Image (spheres, helix red, strand yellow):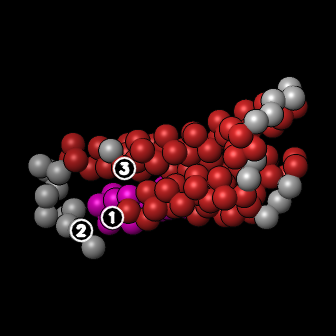
């Protein structure tokens, strides 16, 4: 469930990155658009994304032993942090790349955990947690 929430939070980040500039370009104004473009809103999205990664991936890594989800997560978080310090096109590119990497990390993590759970009756002694 944590991986699904993490993937959804990352997808929300991507939607924000795509649709907020579109709303601004179309001339939308008001409190909603103003709040979507502030720096604090980026942190409001970033903090849950980071927390979901921290509670999901390390524990799962102990079970499936694959470095791929952690690697994708490091790339994704790095790109999102870079986006926080970038502007205009670079911010959009970093945000989209980071959000996509995090979605892939969560979905791959979920897939690997499901695979381990299917094999657990056969390998119960070898899948002890770290």
Where 1 sits versus 78, above or below? above
Identify which residue is drawn at 33% across, 44% down: 1
Q: Earlier in the sequence, mark 2 or mark 1?
A: 1
Determine which residue is flagged by label 3.
Answer: 2
Q: Earlier in the sequence, mark 1 or mark 3?
A: 3
Quick one: which residue is furthest to the top in this view? 26
Determine which residue is flagged by label 1.
Answer: 59
- C-alpha separation, residue under disc 2 versus residue under disc 3: 18 Å
Identify which residue is drawn at 87% across, 29% down: 27
* In magenta segment, residue 65: yes
Q: Earlier in the sequence, mark 2 or mark 3?
A: 3
Where 130 sits versus 51, above or below? below
Q: Whole-percent x and y of residue 21?
A: 81, 37
Q: Nearer the viewer, residue 47 or 1?
A: 47
Identify which residue is drawn at 65% across, 53% down: 41
Q: Residues within 10 Å of mark 3 (few under 14, many from 20)?
A: some
Q: Whole-percent x and y of residue 61?
A: 37, 62
Magenta: main secondary structure: helix
Determine which residue is flagged by label 2.
Answer: 129
Identify which residue is drawn at 59% across, 63% down: 74
Where are the magenta residues, as a range? 56-71
**Residues at circles 2 and 3 in contact by the CB criterion of under 8 Å:** no
């Amino acid at each position: 469930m944590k991986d699904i929430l993490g993937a959804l939070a990352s997808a929300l980040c991507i939607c924000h990155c795509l649709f907020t500039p579109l709303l601004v370009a179309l001339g939308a104004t008001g409190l909603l658009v103003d709040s979507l473009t502030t720096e604090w809103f980026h942190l409001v999205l970033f903090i849950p994304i980071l927390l979901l990664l921290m509670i999901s991936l390390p524990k799962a890594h102990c079970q499936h032993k694959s470095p791929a989800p952690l690697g994708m997560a490091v790339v994704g978080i790095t790109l999102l942090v870079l986006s926080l310090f970038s502007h205009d096109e670079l911010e959009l590119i970093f945000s989209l790349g980071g959000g996509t990497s995090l979605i892939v990390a969560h979905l791959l993590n979920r897939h690997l955990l499901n695979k381990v759970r299917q094999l657990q009756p056969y390998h119960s002694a070898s899948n002890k947690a770290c």
